Every structure is written in C-alpha cells, then in structure tokens.
Image (spheres, helix red, strand yellow):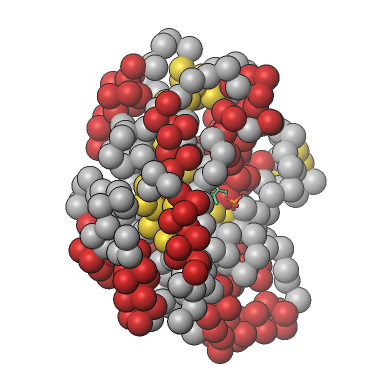
C-alpha cells in the first residue's frame, strides 16, 4: 500500500462541488480584487480565531512582514531593534524580521516541544529587544500563557507565526488570539489551505489593522491617496471565496488529524523513534506535521519508503546555516537547533488518510 506524504488532490476533491460553486460565483461577479469575498472571509476568519480584526494578504510571509512593518509605521519599532525568535523556525519567520531591517535574536527552543519557551526567551531579552515572534511550530502552540505574560511585563510586542497552527488552542484561546498580532498562511498544504497562495493577519489593535490594510495595497488608506509606501500584497477574491468553503471544514479536519496523531503516539513503540510531546493538553496541537526524532534519519526514511511510506523533513537546514544568512548569523552555535535539523522526520498526517494507511505506517515504523 502506498502512503503519500500529502495528497492535496484528495483533500480538495472532498469539497469539489462547493469549491467549484464558489469559483463560479467569483468568475461571474466581475469583481476580482478586494471585494465582498475578501471582506466576508476576513470577518468569518476573525470570528473563528476569536480576534477583533483580520486583514487578508497575498501569503503568510507578507502577513508576517506587514505586521512588523505596520508597527514600524506606527512608531512602535525602528530599524535595528531586536526581535526574539526561535532558532529552529521555518526561514519565513526570519525573513520577515530582516526584510524590515530589524535584528533576529535567535533563541534555542524548548527541548521537549521544539517550541519557544519563556525561560530561554527571558535569557535573551536585552533592552534593545523590542518584540517577540513566537512560532507555533508543527501545529503546537508555543507556551503562550507564559510568553504573553513575559511580554506584558517587559512591554514587548508579541507577534505569532500561526502559519502551521490554525485552530490550536489553550483554554479556548486560539492561535492568533494570544499576541498583539498574528500571521497565518493558507498555502495549499497548511491545515487551512487555499488553492494557491494566501495569508492573513489577525490583531487586537484597530490602528495596526488599518495600517496593514493600507500597506497591503500600496500604502493607500483611501483611493488615490498614499500616506505610506507599501507593496501589493492583497488577498484575491477567488482565494477568499475558496477559503470560505475550506473554513467550514477545518474543525473536522483538525479532529481527524488529532485522531491519527493519538494512534501514532499510542502505537508507535520503536525505541529508536522519539515521539513528539504535547505540553498544554490535546487541544493545543493541530498536528500540521507529525515530527519524530531518529538518530539515523536516512536509514529510517529509506526503510519506510521501501514499504511505500513517504516522509519529509521540516527542515533539513537551520536558518543560521542558510547561505542567505552566512554573513549575519552563520557564526552562531545553536547545538539543540542543529541536532533537531539533523534528526527530525515528518510522518504523513492528513485528514484524508485512511485507517488502513495509518495502520500501515504504524506497522512499518515499528520494524526494527
Ligand atoms: C508556511 C509558513 C510560512 C510562510 O507562509 P507562506 O504562505 O508560504 O508565505 C511562515 N511561517 C511558517 C512557520 C510556515 O510554516
């Protein structure tokens, strides 16, 4: 039996009729950019997250960039300010910081969850660090109760990279509702995936929402008037209409992901496979990725592949080891981050996996 890493075709085929009707509605409307579909999606997504404001963007990276850019335009950050960020994040989190001429302050993650923890974060907070970018890596909320409290005490801005964590919550407070602002990606493979690129910012402050709304559209608050200089980072009507369909199914999809993760965690018993741990209750994780740590990664992946199970790596190279950051971050020694990048393997997990596929994976992962 073949177990693909991710079957996007199957994921969207479940909603083909609804998606085609939504696309037809946009095609027939004659209005394709910044219209009623974007407005409706922003309002529906803000309600679902539990955040007062949502601004659709072209992708997740632009949402991250514009959140920080908005704070700069509002005078809350300036060139050279430090932004604390987990060292083992996806490169986009770091790009958003450097793109704004801010300084990434890399923090080693918590050893158990691979997420940002309050203790190691507190240790890097020098006076020039003005903001924290917490990443909910693999779908698990970072330790947000402690991180949010620390940010309040120190007067730091708190941005969430929620690109992998749509719907994860602690005590009913979801990813995207903890920080001053949060960025979501709706890249097709994410838990809430568009059929192309799309993203969104959620935030608490109406002024930031207004600024990012202008920034995504050339810096224009009002047609033909530009108060600030901005890019074109708009969410389009077609993706917004498709996302409105997908949003209706995200809770069921996340429930199925949790069911599969629970079986993996119960039934994978190979001592060489270090299973992911969940810190703040089952609801705090939506299992965008199911990441295990194995000492001999290449052999493990090959063995699974020999039995038809496709795996992936998130991520093989740490940001500070990327050529793009050789000059500025290449000198850093981050042993835990480096070990994580050497040893992690992502097992297939998705709402369209069948029980038979789940069982096949468990059987193969347990082979010595
Ligand atoms: C996917 C992702 C992003 C970037 O989102 P795009 O929509 O691809 O630009 C940012 N951060 C993390 C953690 C991601 O997984």
State the image coordinates of residue 229 (x, y, percent, origin top left).
74, 34
Identify the residue at image location x=46%, y=72%.
307
The answer to which of 26 and 342 lies nearer the viewer is: 342
Q: Residue furthest right?
A: 224
- Residue 158 visible, this orientation: no
169 displayed left or right of 239 = left
Left or right placement of residue 319 versus residue 145 in this view: right
- Tell which of 16 and 57 is nearer to you: 16
Q: Is residue 146 above or below residue 332?
A: below
The quadrant in which residue 71 appears is: top right
> Percent from the top left, x then y, of residue 247?
45, 70
Pick whichever, 309 or 315, lies toward us.
309
State the image coordinates of residue 72 (x, y, percent, origin top left): 59, 26
Q: Is residue 225 above or below residue 351?
A: above
Q: How many marks?
A: 0
Tell me where residue 54 appears, x and y as whole percent.
49, 52
Q: Quadrant of residue 75?
A: top right
Q: Residue at x 63, y 19 (%)?
A: 328
Furthest toward the top, the residue is 127
- Quadrant for the C terminus, please: bottom left
> Which residue lies at the image location 20% right of the left edge and 63% below the top edge?
266
Does the rendering let one see residue 356? Answer: yes
Between residues 18 and 323, which one lies in front from this camera angle? 323
Quick one: which residue is furthest to the bottom in this view?
A: 17
Q: Residue at x 57, y 65 (%)?
A: 188
Question: In this picture, is 232 found above or below 250?
Answer: above
Q: Does residue 82 appear to the left or right of 214 in the view shown?
A: left
């Amino acid at each position: 039996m073949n177990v693909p890493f991710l079957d996007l075709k199957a994921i969207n085929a479940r909603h083909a009729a609804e998606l085609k009707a939504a696309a037809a509605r946009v095609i027939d409307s004659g209005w394709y950019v910044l219209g009623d579909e974007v407005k409706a999606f922003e309002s529906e997504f803000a309600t679902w997250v539990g955040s007062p404001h949502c601004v659709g963007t072209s992708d997740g990276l632009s949402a991250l960039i514009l959140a920080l850019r908005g704070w700069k335009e509002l005078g809350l950050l300036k060139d050279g300010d430090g932004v604390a960020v987990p060292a083992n994040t996806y490169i986009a989190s770091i790009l958003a910081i450097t793109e704004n001429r801010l300084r990434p302050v890399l923090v080693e993650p918590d050893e158990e969850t691979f997420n940002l923890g309050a203790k190691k974060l507190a240790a890097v907070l020098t006076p020039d660090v003005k903001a924290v970018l917490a990443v909910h890596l693999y779908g698990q909320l970072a330790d947000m109760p402690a991180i949010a409290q620390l940010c309040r005490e120190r007067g730091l801005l708190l941005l969430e990279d929620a690109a992998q964590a749509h719907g994860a919550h602690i005590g009913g407070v979801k990813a995207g509702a903890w920080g001053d602002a949060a960025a979501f990606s709706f890249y097709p493979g994410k838990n809430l995936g568009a059929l192309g690129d799309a993203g969104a910012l959620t935030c608490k402050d109406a002024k930031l929402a207004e600024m990012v709304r202008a920034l995504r559209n050339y810096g224009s608050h009002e047609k033909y008037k530009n108060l600030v200089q901005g890019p074109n980072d708009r969410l389009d009507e077609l993706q917004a209409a498709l996302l409105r369909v997908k949003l209706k199914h995200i809770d069921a999809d996340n429930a199925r992901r949790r069911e599969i993760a629970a079986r993996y965690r119960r039934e994978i018993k190979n001592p060489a496979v270090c299973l992911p741990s969940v810190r703040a209750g089952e609801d705090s994780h939506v299992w965008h990725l199911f990441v295990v740590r194995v000492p001999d990664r290449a052999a493990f992946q090959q063995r699974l592949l020999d039995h038809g199970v496709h795996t992936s790596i998130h991520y093989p190279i740490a940001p500070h080891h990327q050529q793009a950051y050789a000059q500025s971050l290449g000198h850093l020694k981050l042993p835990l981050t480096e070990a994580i990048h050497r040893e992690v393997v992502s097992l297939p997990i998705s709402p369209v996996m069948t029980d038979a596929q789940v069982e096949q994976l468990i059987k193969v992962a347990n082979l010595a």
